[in-house]
Image: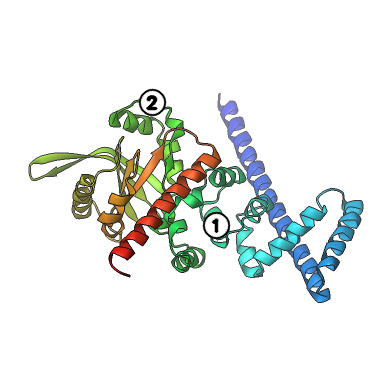
Amino acid sequence: MKNNLEFNNLFSGIKQLIDETRSAVAQTVNSGLTMMYWNIGKKINGDILKNKRAEYGEGIVATLSRQLTNEYGSGFSGKSLSRMVQFYELFPDYKIVATLWRQLTWSHFKMILPMKDDLQREFYTQMCRIETWSVRTLRNKIDSMLFERTAISKKPEELAKLEMKGLKDKDKMTPDLVFRSPYILDFLNLKDTYQEKDLESAIISEIQRFVLELGKGFSFVERQKRMIIGNDDFYLDLLFYHRKLKRLVAVELKIGKFKAAYKGQMELYLKWLEKYEMEDGENKPIGLILCAEKNQEQVELLELDKSNIKVSEYITEILPKEVLKDKLHQFYNQSELMIEERKASYGE
């Protein structure tokens, strides 16, 4: 028995050593390849700029591709070399790239580079770095249109850039980077008709996947958090803590359309949490009301962002990307129309 135990300990120790070494070697190889592709892009870009002719650039890339492929095999097609040039053009600062390739592989960059929107590209780049997304996770986030579902994508460009700068320079997460709408809860497998308690029970049974959809940094604290206020009992559906935001997150689940009365209920919960649960050094609690339908006009009129309350829709089935895109565009158009109408009413 003792010999078996000693052997098992020996085997486990060696296995751990091999796994850690392989992981470190893979990381070194990935970093080396990414650095090489960036430098290739830099050299080609410099040569093309020196000659200042677009047709020269196309010709030199094609010639290089043929010769490099003959010398080293696949991986140096014309398309691949053009992508390396684009890599350098979009990330020209060596210090920034040297920081990024510790977490991002070339496969990550290949998915990020084609993005035409600078803010979108920066969002996915920094979130990959901070939350250490795998390539598969990044692909899922892009396919589910995570950027378009966050509040940062709806902000004026200059304000959005300031928040992204804080994320890039100081790893500063803000609620507009953390919260999103809609949340995609297809993994709950809810039937066509269900009650709030069914939604809550399904979330609890799939809490790990629910936290993944919420985003990295969330930790589950409690279900049906009891609050005694003036001899009355109140119960908060779900309570989380967000490590980067350093604050409690109160979550209320609603199966119907958002109602203005939900604001008062959530404000009461947040005040109670601030008074009795908030620790020294934490920021004030924030509320998330998850509804089947958002009721955008009421949300706008109530100015919920100023009261530290977020309202988001949830989807209980996977939507085709085009349908999700149409849904988000419809939401943006409604928001812009209400803003314009409000300006017109005030004679702005």
Res 151 → quadrant: bottom left
Q: Residue at x 67, y 47 (%)?
A: 21
Which secondary structure, mark 1?
helix
Q: Position of residue 194 (x, y in %)?
A: 33, 27
Q: Is residue 143 left or right of residue 328?
A: right
Circle 2 or circle 1, nearest the eye: 2
Q: Is residue 272 left or right of residue 87?
A: left
Q: Position of residue 344 (x, y in %)?
A: 32, 64
Q: Is residue 325 above or below residue 123?
A: above
Which colour style is shown? Answer: rainbow
Q: Which mark is residue 12?
A: none
Q: Is residue 341 above or below residue 268?
A: below
Residue for badge 2: 192
> Which amino acid type is marked by label 1?
Gln
Q: Is residue 72 left or right of residue 32?
A: right
Q: Is residue 273 left or right of residue 75?
A: left
